[in-house]
Image (cartoon, grey):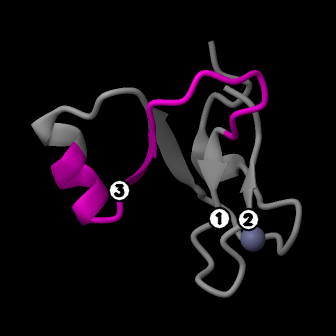
Amino acid sequence: MSLFDDPSDVSCPQCGTTDPIEIVYGLPSSEMIEAAAEGAIALGGHVIRDDIPAFLCRNDGCGHKFGRL
Ligand SMILES: [Zn+2]
């Protein structure tokens, strides 16, 4: 379940940039690795924590991670 229906409506709480990159967790498939290489998603790795962020700001000068899965 996602807090956000449409990431393009989400803005970074730090800099206000919209349409953040979705962070995908777990063992990446080859499709996911390709998508990450194209900047479509970010790979969060295999982490099991309560406070993992859902989005990565696409502003290079910011890079803030925010939101919850
Ligand atoms: Zn930002």
Mark 2 → mark 1, Cα distance in angstroms: 5 Å
Name the quarter showing ligand 1. Answer: bottom right
Residue at the spot of label 3:
40
Placement of the C terminus among the 4 image quadrants: top right
Q: Position of residue 15 (x, y in %)?
A: 83, 75
Numbered mark located on residue 64 in the image:
2
Q: Is residue 44 above or below residue 59?
A: above
Viewer-closest of 37 and 45: 45
Mark 3 → mark 1, Cα distance in angstroms: 12 Å
Q: Earlier in the sequence, mark 2 or mark 3?
A: 3
Q: Residue at x 24, y 52 (%)?
A: 35
- Where disc 3 sits, the SS reads loop
Q: Position of residue 54 (x, y in %)?
A: 64, 38
- Which is more foreground, mark 2 or mark 1? 2
The amino acid on which the numbered mark 2 sits, given as a three-letter code, is His
Viewer-closest of 1 and 24: 24
Disc 2 Cβ-to-ligand 1 distance below 8 Å: yes
Residue at the spot of label 1:
57
The amino acid on which the numbered mark 1 sits, given as a three-letter code, is Cys
Q: Residues within 10 Å of mark 1 (few under 14, many from 20)?
A: many
